Image: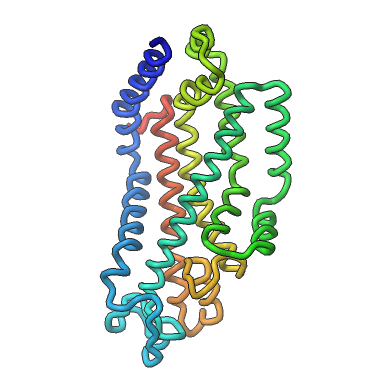
Amino acid sequence: MPATTLSAGHAGRTSRWWQNRTLRRFTRHRLALFGLIMITLLVLACVLGPHILPYDELFIDLRARFAPPFTGYHIFGTDPLGRDVAARLFNAGRISLLVGFFAMLLSTLIGTVIGIVAGYYGGRIGAALMRFVDAFLSFPSIFLLLALAAFIKPSPFMITVIIAVTSWMEIARLVEAEIRSLRERDFVVAARMLGLSNSWIMFRELLPNAIGPIIVAATLTVARAILLEAYVSFLGYGIQPPLPSWGNMLNGAQQYLDSAPWLAIVPGIAITLAVTSFNFIGDGLRDALDARSDLN
């Protein structure tokens, strides 16, 4: 069937290009590899850590209140209630990383669909969709996020949705520009001559050829979503105790900065490592997917 042959040819070329050029370039990017290693270690710590530690995040030992790091089995110390900071950190990491990941998926999906439709059709449809994007961009995302969080009952699911709703616009603009530059290429003209539908052309022909910038944007969106969740939870509008997140751990630690600074340092380092590592991965993917880049 002609459509199948056309798509198979593009898929084969894309796969070979990824294997032969992109992967090699990415593995030569030292900061990107560092970021990938750190994210892997963070994920493993958050998944396996709570099962290895002798205490869970809800265990209270009033005799061990404000124990400094490396006191007995408390490798990161304890909080004002005597709860193990490491156990809370790893369980909070599960929530913060999941919020960041699913917010990225949702915002990337929304932005990609709007960007593809606007870029492919252009004209009035494209202009109307991009003005819709501009309308969202006209509001500062932080204030829009806080306003939505203040009126909606906070939960990991709702915080994820709110972050996604305030984070898709940049992806839409990026995808729209990329699709607009691809829609008159020879393979698109050939697909139209074969009588393929617009939806087939948009999502089976154009989308695979624009996947590189989308992957880079999605990676950077994870870092932004983790930072936004921490910011909102730190201000008290995000995930609420006793459910831990890195943001509300910082919120609870601010009054103990002088007497127990590790309560803020430990989640602060975790947020910094996660955000920086995802940014490094995004930079590495951007360079690896750019045919003009040379990391030798």
Q: Residue furthest top?
A: 193
Q: Relative to 160, say whether 23 is above or below.
A: above
Is 177 left or right of 272, judged from the image as shown?
Answer: right
In which quarter of the view is residue 91 placed? bottom left
Viewer-side residue, 224 vs 57? 57
- Quick one: quadrant of the N terminus? top left
In which quarter of the view is residue 77 placed? bottom left
Q: Residue at x 57, y 52 (%)?
A: 161
Tell me where residue 252 appears, x and y as whole percent.
53, 76
Q: Residue at x 43, y 29 (%)?
A: 290
Tell me where residue 287 appears, x and y as whole percent.
42, 34
Is 195 left or right of 266, judged from the image as shown?
Answer: right
The colour mode here is: rainbow
Q: Residue furthest front?
A: 1
Q: Relative to 222, say whether 132 is above or below.
A: above
Q: Residue furthest bottom?
A: 63
Q: Relative to 74, say whether 98 is above or below.
A: above
Is 78 left or right of 227, judged from the image as shown?
Answer: left
Is 83 left or right of 178, judged from the image as shown?
Answer: left
Tell me where residue 242 appears, x and y as whole percent.
49, 75
Q: Residue at x 44, y 56 (%)?
A: 98
Q: Residue at x 50, y 21 (%)?
A: 200
Viewer-side residue, 118 vs 214? 118
Viewer-side residue, 144 vs 158? 158
Q: Disc count in the image?
A: 0
Tell me where residue 296 appears, x and y as whole percent.
32, 32
Q: Relative to 123, say whether 159 is above or below.
A: below
